[in-house]
Image: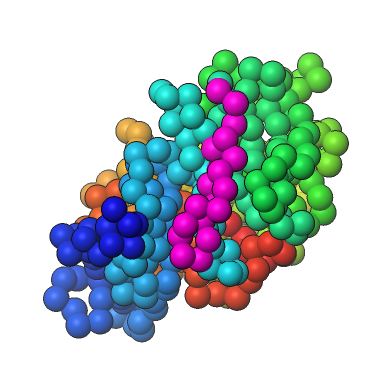
Amino acid sequence: MNPVKLASTICSVVVLCCAAARGSERPNILLQQGSGALAADVTHRFFTCGWSSGGPTLYDEQCQMVWNSPTKAEVSDGWVLPDGSVVYSYSMRKEGVSSVIRLDAEKNKMWEYRLPEGRDNHSCQPLPHGGFLLGECAEDGLWMLELDADGKELKRVKVADAVNDIHHAFRMVRKTPEGTYLGTLMKSAQAEGQELKAKHAYEWDSTGKLIRTFPSGFFVAVRLPDGNTLVSEGGGVDGRGVTEYDADGNVVWALTSDDLKAAGLRVGMVCGIQRLPNGNTIVSNVKHGKHFLGAPDGEMPKVFEVTPDKKVVWKVLAETVSMNMGGIQVLDVKGNPFRFEVHR
């Protein structure tokens, strides 16, 4: 079935709502932190993907699904590009299949880059040369792999030796405007005889030399315009779900368990994040694992947005869909992902 027609069918049976309460004529509302007081409406067009997400999906401002490419694969990373085309990573661990797929604006497949069997990847960051960055995990090491605009291998840089479980090494890796590479590790690795511990973010230069170790980081690390680095902490590190580090490794901003309690929220695993131009932060909330941050009986939205002072201004309720939204790209903000202008 054509994906657009399928999305229409899904929409007819799935109730989609971003309201804080059912029955509102305008479903998207802003809640002041901890108070529950209605303040103003905030809406977003957005794109989602992730583990157990049901496939890459586009939503409009009212959280209505407008397109979906259904799959049971783990689609950790995905992007809507300036011309309306879509690129996403694709991993089926048990089948030994991993690839990156690009669709045109009409959502027809342009190309698919398939990794050799026994290799895994969960990234597809757009790059200034028109291609994409992958984080290839294999028995011969961990690699930063760049594709060109046609999905052909352009460059590969080894940054560490192999880990025992290649499926749980990198998730989303990122290149920076300075030409360095950022990656977080789920499992410990070795590089030039040095241990790279799990649950930390790392930065390598263009040749693969380790130049920086961050105090934490689990799913993705993102370089911000001011040079700071924003990391998602997975199930939480030292009571934090998201942490922003300055150039010296100091915590300059964090979303903590206490912040979440004050907002009446409960968080399972923070995977995808996005820093918006206005300074707000988009946070994904994947229901995974046994440990939670925030209020024990708090609300668990799929995605939410917080201001720098931790006020919740937008959220996608759990009732919206049953699938996870581990990766998210807000689409109604300025920025070209090929120019490092979308910070996620």
Q: Nearer the viewer, residue 74 or 249?
A: 74
Q: Nearer the viewer, residue 94 or 198?
A: 94
Taking the spot 15% from the left edge, 60% from the top edge, the residue there is: 13
Q: Is residue 301 visible?
A: no
Q: Position of residue 54 (x, y in %)?
A: 33, 47
* Residue 116 on the magenta span: yes
Where residue 188 sits, quadrant-wise, is: top right
**Residue 4 left/right relative to 193:** left
Taking the spot 58% from the left edge, 69% from the top edge, the residue there is: 83
Where residue 252 sits, quadrant-wise, is: bottom right
Q: Position of residue 25 (x, y in %)?
A: 20, 82
**Quadrant where the image shows the C terminus:** bottom right
**Residue 113 left/right relative to 180:** left
Looking at the rendering, the stretch of residues picked out in magenta corresponds to 99-117
Q: Nearer the viewer, residue 120 or 275?
A: 120
**Residue 37 left/right relative to 97:** left
Where residue 276 sits, quadrant-wise, is: bottom right
Q: Position of residue 336 (x, y in %)?
A: 65, 68
Taking the spot 75% from the left edge, 30% from the top edge, the residue there is: 159
Q: How many marks?
A: 0
Q: How is the image coloured?
A: rainbow
Taking the spot 83% from the left edge, 41% from the top edge, the residue there is: 205
**Residue 19 left/right relative to 325:** left
* Residue 83 on the magenta span: no
Q: Position of residue 17 (x, y in %)?
A: 24, 68
Q: Nearer the viewer, residue 107 or 229?
A: 107
Is residue 36 placed above or below 237 in the rendered structure?
below
